[in-house]
Amino acid sequence: MGNEIFQEAKRRIDRRRMNQQVALSARLDEIQEKVPEVIQVRRQLAMTSAEISKLILQKNTDIKAGIARIEKVNLELQQKEKDLLRQNGYPEDYLELRYDCPLCQDTGFVDGRRCRCLVEEMRKLSIEQLNHISPLQKNTFDTFDLSFYPNETDPKTGQNPYMSMQRVLRYCRQYAENFRPGNPSIFMMGETGLGKTHLSLAIAGEVAAKGYNVVYGSAQDLLRRVENEHFGRGEDQNTLETMLDADLLILDDLGAEFGSNFTQSIVYNILNSRLSSDRPVIISTNLKAGELEEKYAKRVVSRLFTQLVQMRFIGKDVRQLKRQREMAARK
């Protein structure tokens, strides 16, 4: 989940800083043993700040001249430390704290905003999470095989599955390539096995790779989590808040969850909140329009069909066709 990803990414950044502090402590111990004069110089440097404080408290003292004198001594001590390190075969900056990210000094933030190192860590975690759900390398735009869709017009519907799915693939690819938090929301409809999950994951993987916060999951799983947390049957992980705040939310297989007044209200809340704040959501379902109307309130169905880009998946069950092709190849 989004908040979990942020917290884990921040922990990783914090660990980097702690590791660098531990490494510096080890270098100090080494110098204490091999070049103790350097440590003595460092102690003298530490005393200069106390001298400045004492100077400020003294009366009838030329503070400006006193500070200039102390600064001169300070610079001389710093140079002495560098000379001692160099003379003993160490780099001049050997006792400086090093950072994995000099930009934020391993805090994760620059001027109150997330540093690129934190964003990158969140991106990696998002991809790890998505890979845990379904390996992203198997669900990319390049692995979406249009050859499974008949390239002929269906006399009943007047549609050509190949041409229709080619347009769907093109739209999804461009959607991911040009993703911004204000992107339109998408409603994927069609029977099982036609590629809705594949393209949802392809979008998720590419958007997450750009550093955006993506929450992906089955509607059944995510809504169950929200319900359990609401009624005190599960750990409070702010699942609903995370779903509402993500840069992109993907709800797979809407309608497979157990229907109740509570889940209806949550689905409406998710739709209403995200659409109102221009945060895109991608929803897929195997249900037909009539089945959706039976399961959800009119206000939910109305938003699905009027405020989301409708994307119809047509053709034959690709998973079955793949199995048939694999079996034929083994013969």
Image (cartoon, rainbow, N blue to C red):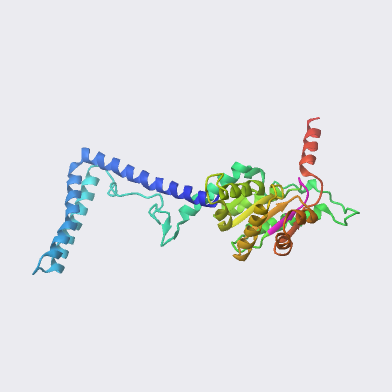
Residue 306 point in image, percent of width and height? 73, 64
Q: Residue at x 17, y 57 (%)?
A: 50
Q: Residue furthest left?
A: 60
Residue 70 placement, left or right of 103 = left
Viewer-proximal residue among 11 and 83: 11
The number of numbered discs placed on residues in the rendered structure image is 0
Magenta segment, which residues?
186-193
Residue 158 point in image, percent of width and height? 88, 57
Evaluate whether residue 141 shows in this view. Answer: no
Evaluate whether residue 98 shows in this view. Answer: yes
Q: Quadrant of residue 281?
A: bottom right
Q: Is residue 135 above or below residue 288?
A: above
Q: Residue furthest right?
A: 155
Residue 83 point in image, percent of width and height? 21, 49
Residue 215 placement, left or right of 100 = right
Q: Quadrant of residue 300?
A: bottom right
Q: Residue at x 61, y 64 (%)?
A: 278
Viewer-proximal residue among 237 and 180: 237
Q: Is residue 46 above or below residue 24?
A: below
- Quadrant in which the C terminus is drawn: top right
Residue 45 point in image, percent of width and height? 19, 53
187 within the magenta span: yes
190 within the magenta span: yes
Q: Is residue 242 above or below residue 27?
A: below
